[in-house]
Amino acid sequence: MTIQFELNGQLVSADTMPGTTLLEYLRSEELYSVKHGCDHGECGACAVLINSKAVNACLILMHTIEGKKIETLESLSNHEHLHPIQETFLRAGAVQCGFCTPGMLLSVEALDREEGEITEESVKDALNGNLCRCTGYVKPVDAALKVLQKNKDEEVQS
């Protein structure tokens, strides 16, 4: 079956077998920020943005993304400059082994795109689906709060 969608800003036409997950497809396309974790939607390692919402790619069948906008961590920055969320996570020491980091970064980006107040509770809720065994979540939550509040302050000033 042939599926058309936008992937990291590029229109894609993909031929896939029925039952192929978005995770399987993205890994076959060498998008390695999308990690193969639990395969049950519980760890967040395979998180991507679909129409700006964070979802687990292991739970998404390819035929359901027809016409949608898919973004992986690769879409947030280039090899020369880090995205502000990436930069803030690094400076705050919120990155350790790195396995969960892409999913966390995309979850924070999805929250940043939403309307509404940024609170510690909203950040914790956004990161809720990301299993991390290294950081204890304190530094990722602090980093997310810092960068999201800065972004909201800049929006108000504009």
Image (cartoon, rainbow, N blue to C red):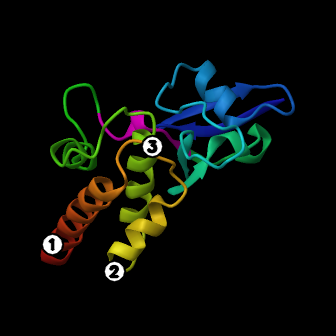
Q: Nearer the viewer, residue 4 or 80?
A: 80
Mark 2 and mark 1 lie on one chain; the one further toward the N terminus is: 2
| Residue 121 occupies quadrant | bottom left
Which type of secondary structure does the marked residue at label 3 adopt? Answer: loop
Q: For the point 45% across and 55% down, which residue is it?
A: 107
Q: Quadrant of the C terminus?
A: bottom left
Q: For the point 25% across and 47% down, which residue is it?
A: 89
> Would you say the residues marked 2 and 3 are in contact, meaning their CB atoms lie under 8 Å apart?
no
Q: Which mark is residue 89?
A: none
**Spatial CA span between label 2 and label 1:** 17 Å
Assess disc 1: are there few (<14), some (14-19) or many (≥20) residues with their C-alpha within 10 Å of its C-alpha.
few
Marks 2 and 3: which is nearer the front? Answer: 3
Q: Which mark is residue 133?
A: 3
Q: Amino acid at mark 1?
A: Ser
Q: Label 1: which residue?
A: 158
Q: Is residue 21 left or right of residue 100?
A: right
Which type of secondary structure does the marked residue at label 2 adopt? Answer: loop
